[in-house]
Amino acid sequence: MGLTDPAVRPEQNDATSVSSVSPNWVTTRLDFLTNWARANSLWPMPFGTACCAIEFMATAASRFDLSRFGMERMSFSPRQADVLICAGRLPFKLAPVIRRIWDQMPQPKWSISMGACASSGGIFDNYSMVQGIDTIIPVDVYVPGCPPRPEGLMYGIMLLQKKIKGESFTDETLRDEKLVGPSGLFLPPERVDELSEPFGNSVHQTRSA
Amino acid sequence: MSPLSPSVPALRAEFGDAVERSLVSSGDSIVYIARDRSHDVLAWLRDTPSQGYNYLTDVTAVEYRDPERPLEVVYQLRSLPRRADLRVKLALDKRGPLEVRSVVDLWRGADWLEREVFDMFGVVFAGHPDLRRILMWETYAEGYPLRKDFPLRGHFSRAEQTRQALAANPEAHYSLEELSIADAFDELPADMRERLARGERGFLK
């Protein structure tokens, strides 16, 4: 599949402009190999905080069997993990914890935000809850649901695999560490406010209510 | 409908005016007592053999929507030998200081319960050995979340809340005393010491 999809640029097809080291054929093949290996041996770092973690455990257990996707082993140490799965709502008290776990994970790394609360705060639009973990760490795939069924999480994992298979290991910007900056946030403050805006039913509640 | 608990007339006979109104709600006896005598009343309820309320089920507080109505601190008592319950309430005028005597010296279990009430409502428990926030982190600066004048989403902007949360040291949420059972090894009951020494929860000593 990936073999039939080389990143061939039209101008480099021109026989008169072949450089001494052709990037087209070689890097595409290496990309394919690297991405194939990475996508099919994702070791998850389970960060289960609530009911989504129950569905996550069901996904890992024999009926749904996460191992089929190469997630053979739960990595309870962030040092050996490839994908952080935040399963459940994240209170502000846990925000520095997930941030530190994310910082401890070596590149390449990805993250999945599982469920409504991890993705947006869900029903907990209140003083104690992070309104989406994307204000704390970068997120690759959001899985909707409250909680998502195991099929939903597996679909999210397959989407992540698809995303990984589209990456190029020569693109170093993909491996940039998005660290917490001098502002104390990894995003601009106004972006955090924007992401945390009330939506759905919670727009009917003002900040003073 | 259950009758009023016999502890209420006994309290009236013992403390007179310090016992305010009493009622039965959903079968539970509730008695309001004066704030200044709360420690005496609760100690009497625990220590008098005919009462014997030796177990403190819960300490909590209630603030009503009516701003004139006082905030209430609620003690839910249980007598394990008599299998009897009693709910003791005391009203705190919100215009005055929100302060009551701590009952940690009567029931050790009141320690964290009173800390929770302090954390959520700002009620100060005089004489508490370690009155710190327990649910919110100790540097939390937005106020007392379960008070009616506290906005649902907090006082600060989301960016500021996130910044303060990320600035926290995750290891600083708990004191060493709370984390380390090893330090308390010698004070543990003998059977627990024996189990721990066998390595059931890992070797401590």
Image (cartoon, grey):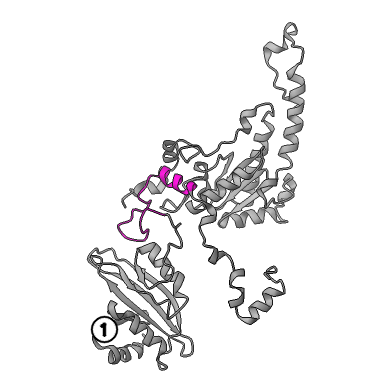
Tag 1's secondary structure? helix
- Lateral position of residue B169 relative to residue A169, left or right: left
Q: Position of residue A61 (x, y in %)?
A: 70, 56
Image-quadrant location for residue A164: top right
Q: Position of residue B94 (x, y in %)?
A: 26, 66
Residue B112 visible in the snapshot? yes
Residue at the location (74% across, 10% down)? Answer: A18
* Mark 1: amino acid: Ala
Work out whether residue A54 or residue B71 is closer to the camera in this orientation and state it.
Answer: B71
Q: Position of residue B55 (x, y in %)?
A: 46, 82
Work out whether residue B181 or residue A149 is closer to the camera in this orientation and state it.
Answer: B181
Neighbor class of circle 1 (other Cα within 10 Å; few <14, some 14-19, many 20+) is some
Q: Position of residue B59 (x, y in %)?
A: 40, 73
For the N terminus of chain A, give its image quadrant: top right
Residue at the location (46% across, 63% down)? Answer: B134
Q: Which residue is mark 1?
A: B18
Residue that protrudes farthest toward the top in the picture: A16
Residue A2 visible in the snapshot? no
Letter of the chain that mark 1 sits on in the rendering: B
Residue at the location (34% across, 72% down)? Answer: B73
Work out whether residue A110 or residue B197 is closer to the camera in this orientation and state it.
Answer: B197
Is B155 in the magenta? yes
Image-quadrant location for residue A159: top right
Number of marks: 1
Q: In the rendered view, tell whether residue B178 sits above or below residue A104.
A: below
Is A108 in the magenta? no
- Lateral position of residue A142 relative to residue A70, left or right: left
In the image, which residues are magenta? Answer: B140-167
- Lateral position of residue B154 relative to residue A90, left or right: left
What is the chief secondary structure element of the magenta stretch? Answer: loop
